[in-house]
Image (cartoon, helix red, strand yellow):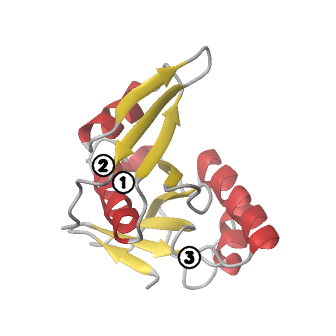
Amino acid sequence: MTDVHTSRLLLHAIDVNEAERILSAVAGPSDVWAHDFPFEGDRIAVGAFLGRTTESGEQRPFGHYRIADSSNGLAIGGIGFKSRPTNGYVEIGYGLVPSARGHGYAAEALTALLDLAATHGVLAVIAATTPDNAASQRVLERVGFEVVRTDDRLRHYEALLAQRSPE
């Protein structure tokens, strides 16, 4: 299993070659990217994915996924796990290019990865946002995350998966 499909999106599990193209912002012959893909957040997340892959090997299904619009195939962002689960917990991060924001894509992609995590025995998914990132906070809360802690730099969220039944 490498790809996850939703009603409007394709979440494609990237490999090292694709990660290197995203990191360098140079599309390959078969890549179809939105005009503003990748953005800085994509490159940061993919760089971390490459580091984990170098250190620990294959990450799937707990790797990084390119988010593409199913209607046209355009890459519009990324979502992924920041590590493999530890003690039943795993952290997630996501981002969309500016041209794709405001259409519910982040919530749709996040819901799909919560379902994926649940099917692989994860008990809870955690995430964090900066206090000023109201849009990301709304996405997290919309899909069932709750604030568990705040500090000077971040607002920390958790979604418990024990009661979740994948769709």
CA gap, disc 2 and disc 1: 5 Å
The residue under label 1 is: 110
The residue under label 2 is: 107
Q: Secondary structure at mark 3?
A: loop
Say above or below: 159 vs 165.
above
Name which residue lies at 29% across and 54% down: 162
Instruction: Give left or right: position of 108 versus 28.
Output: left
Q: Position of residue 25 (x, y in %)?
A: 68, 62
In the image, what residue type sits under mark 3? Answer: Arg
The tally of labels here is 3
Q: Position of residue 39 (x, y in %)?
A: 59, 50
Seen from the viewer's position, the closer of residues 42 and 38 is 42
Dot 3 or dot 1, earlier in sequence: 3
Q: Secondary structure at mark 1?
A: helix
Q: Position of residue 122 (x, y in %)?
A: 43, 60
Say above or below: 24 vs 39.
below
Residue sticking out furthest to the front: 87
Circle 2 Cα neighbour tier, 10 Å, few/some/many (<14 / 14–19 / ≥20)? some
Labelled pair 3, 2 in contact (Cβ < 8 Å): no
Residue 9, quarter of picture: bottom left
Labelled pair 2, 1 in contact (Cβ < 8 Å): yes
In the image, what residue type sits under mark 2? Answer: Ala
